């Protein structure tokens, strides 16, 4: 395995067509129409009600990393259909379509960047690539990022935005959870700081991984659940307190350190990195 | 009479004849032979979804059956020391082939009343926390190896479980089980349901009964998500590669424990003993490793799982 290979690459933010750019977006929460430019300027947060729209991996990196400091690693790790899985479409096709649409080869973008001037290893799940689901390639990239951070003694920031395991990779996807948790444990044992950022949604196995952070931060309104969308559906059906499994209620149960508005996400991370940088060694 | 599964319907008249013959005190040799023959035929040609049903058969030996048969002086230990005691997980210590050994497993019930009590083998966060607490106790105080028995549809999917930190409990178990300093042998005896199974499933050796399953998601759940049609569970079971044979080929399972035609629910004693024998074999191999080597190999096993292009 070529674990610590580094390659520079500019991440592609999925292209928004002119047509889409011209069309106003309807807020999923308050129903108001917002121009694309206005939404973009407000970090994809509804200016009226504060609803946090999903970000792509590229947008996420741009939000957290200092300008022009991100260099991607492990770009050569690519998702593959090892089980010949076919549901209504073949998994091969799903991968192909996701690649074409996003310019990514897996549901993870990982690399090194400066955050508020501090060097850090940073990775994000890409929801736009098959729901950000955790397959072998994604699992391998996240694992390598953690090993990369450990080897270089960098703090580690991972942003979660995932529907859970990649079902089309069967048991391999479940085992990625164990693999990543082991890598995280080994990283934390070495004294590393793992800042885990949960965004909407963080489900199933990825919720498990996300909870292994030293500091666990969730974005406002993020839906977080180990049972995943089926439970979310159940909750919606029964119409009981739809907020129940959102970040705001989980912090009351003692499961999160901080719930933060997207506008304050980076500065919160930077504060932690600053404390970490001034730790007594 | 044993509950017949959908693909065993051709046995119904034979079982009825057997019952009749027994009632009339007639010889049953011929009919019993016929049943065995038919079972052999049926079981030599099972689909993955048939195996799913065998894995869920209510008469299949459960964790408590294995403990009762294979352990002496078993002492159950209760509670997570934080919130509660989850009956869906049974944990304790006893003698296995004369040696002090820990055992942790999911507990399923035999009937509806029991199943409601044990939540169908779906553990709450308290269950996972109890399992870890006992694992630490067994390995660090009693210096004993641990056998884990996996048989669950999945982790408890309730809002209460989420609120009490199901994700954190399982994450912490995975992390800590990698560092348990004595050998762990995990055996899938029925349903290996996703994170619910993995939560007590980090082990040095993973064994699987021939008619058990281990999957990232239930075939029904998979069908409703990917096909958007829960009735496509059969297709999903095919696609997921969740049988012992498949998982052996995928290098996830170290050893398949054979079950006779008819399944463990028709050959309870025989299968329980086979599980005991294979567990002992695995423990023998592992006991030769130094603690350092043991932990290294456990981690290596998981860190290398995954298929991707590069
Ligand atoms: Zn709004």
Image: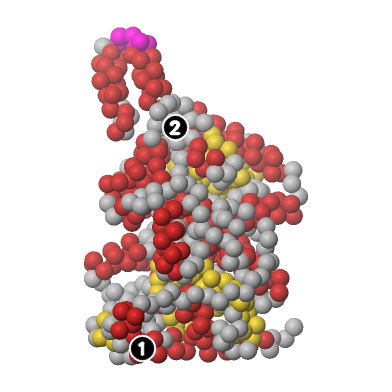
Tell me if residue A51 comes above or below residue B14 in the rendering.
below
Camera sees residue B110: no
Tell me if residue B255 comes above or below residue A47 in the rendering.
above
Q: Position of residue A256 (x, y in %)?
A: 47, 77
Q: Nearer the viewer, mark 1 or mark 2?
A: 1
Task: From the viewer's perspective, tell me whether residue A88 is left or right of residue A174.
Answer: left
The residue wearing badge 1 is A37
Q: Secondary structure at mark 2?
A: loop
Tell me if residue B3 comes above or below residue B252 in the rendering.
above
Residue at horizontal 38 percent and vertical 63 percent from the top: A228
| Magenta stretch holds residue A180 | no
Q: Quadrant of residue A32?
A: bottom left
Subunit bearing disc 1: A
How was this image coloured? secondary structure
Q: Secondary structure at mark 1?
A: helix
The residue wearing badge 2 is B264
Residue at horizontal 68 percent and vertical 89 percent from the top: A278
Q: Position of residue A83 (x, y in %)?
A: 47, 47
Q: Is mark 2 within 8 Å of ligand 1?
A: no
Crowding near pointer 2: few (<14 within 10 Å), some, many (20+)? Answer: many
Residue at horizontal 68 percent and vertical 67 percent from the top: A5
What range is drawn magenta here?
Answer: B25-30
Q: Position of residue A277 (x, y in %)?
A: 67, 86
Crowding near pointer 1: few (<14 within 10 Å), some, many (20+)? Answer: some
Which of the image's four quarters has the C terminus of chain A?
Answer: bottom right
The CA distance from mark 1 to mark 2 is 63 Å
Count numbered badges in the picture: 2
Q: Quadrant of residue B181?
A: bottom right
Q: Camera-side residue: A93 or A197?
A: A93
**Proximity of marks 1 and 2: CB atoms separated by less than 8 Å:** no
């Amino acid at each position: 395995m070529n674990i610590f290979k580094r390659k520079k690459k500019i991440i592609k933010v999925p292209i928004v067509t002119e047509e889409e750019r011209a069309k106003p977006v309807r807020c999923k929460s308050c129903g108001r129409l917002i121009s694309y430019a206005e939404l973009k300027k407000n970090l994809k947060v509804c200016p009226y009600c504060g609803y946090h729209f999903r970000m792509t991996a590229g947008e996420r990196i741009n939000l957290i990393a200092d300008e022009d400091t991100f260099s991607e690693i492990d770009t050569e790790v690519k998702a593959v259909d090892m089980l010949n899985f076919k549901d209504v479409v073949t998994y091969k096709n799903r991968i192909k379509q996701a690649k074409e649409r996003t310019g990514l080869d897996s549901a993870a973008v990982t690399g090194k960047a400066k955050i508020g001037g501090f060097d850090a290893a940073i990775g994000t799940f890409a929801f736009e690539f098959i729901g950000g689901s955790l397959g072998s390639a994604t699992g391998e990239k996240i694992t390598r990022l953690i090993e990369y951070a450990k080897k270089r003694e960098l703090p580690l920031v991972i942003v979660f935005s995932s529907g859970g395991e990649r079902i089309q990779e069967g048991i391999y996807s479940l085992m990625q959870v164990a693999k990543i948790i082991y890598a995280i444990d080994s990283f934390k044992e070495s004294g590393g700081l793992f800042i885990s950022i949960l965004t909407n949604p963080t489900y199933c196995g990825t919720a498990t991984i996300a909870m292994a952070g030293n500091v666990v931060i969730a974005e406002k309104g993020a839906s977080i659940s180990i049972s995943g969308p089926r439970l979310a559906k159940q909750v919606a059906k029964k119409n009981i307190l739809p907020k129940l499994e959102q970040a705001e209620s989980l912090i009351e149960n003692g499961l999160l350190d901080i719930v933060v508005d997207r506008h304050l996400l980076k500065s919160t991370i930077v504060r932690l990195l600053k404390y970490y940088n001034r730790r007594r060694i | 009479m044993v509950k017949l599964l959908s693909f065993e319907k051709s046995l119904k008249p034979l079982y009825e004849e057997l019952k009749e013959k027994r009632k009339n005190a007639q010889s049953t040799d011929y009919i019993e032979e016929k049943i065995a023959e038919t079972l052999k035929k049926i079981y030599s040609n099972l689909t993955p979804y048939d195996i799913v049903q065998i894995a869920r058969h209510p008469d299949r030996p459960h964790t408590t059956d294995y403990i009762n048969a294979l352990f002496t002086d078993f002492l159950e230990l209760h509670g997570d020391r934080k919130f509660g005691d989850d009956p869906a997980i049974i944990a304790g210590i006893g003698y296995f082939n004369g040696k002090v050994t820990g055992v942790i497993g999911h507990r399923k019930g035999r009937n509806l009343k029991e199943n409601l009590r044990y939540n169908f083998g779906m553990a709450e966060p308290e269950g996972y926390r109890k399992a870890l607490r006992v694992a630490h106790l067994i390995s660090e105080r009693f210096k004993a190896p641990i056998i884990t028995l996996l048989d669950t549809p999945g982790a408890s999917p309730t809002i209460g479980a989420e609120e009490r930190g199901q994700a954190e409990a399982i994450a912490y178990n995975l992390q800590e089980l990698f560092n348990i300093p004595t050998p762990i042998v995990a055996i899938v005896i029925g349903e290996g349901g996703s994170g619910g199974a993995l939560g007590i499933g980090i082990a040095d050796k993973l064994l699987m009964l021939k008619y058990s399953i281990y999957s990232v998601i239930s075939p029904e759940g998979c069908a409703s998500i990917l096909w958007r049609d829960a009735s496509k569970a059969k297709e999903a079971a095919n696609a997921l590669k969740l049988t012992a044979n498949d998982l052996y080929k995928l290098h996830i399972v170290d050893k398949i424990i054979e079950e006779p035609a008819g399944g463990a629910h028709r050959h309870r004693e025989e299968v329980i003993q086979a599980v005991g024998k294979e567990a002992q074999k695995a423990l023998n191999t592992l006991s030769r490793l130094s603690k350092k080597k043991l932990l290294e190999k456990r981690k290596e096993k998981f860190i290398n799982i995954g298929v991707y292009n590069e």
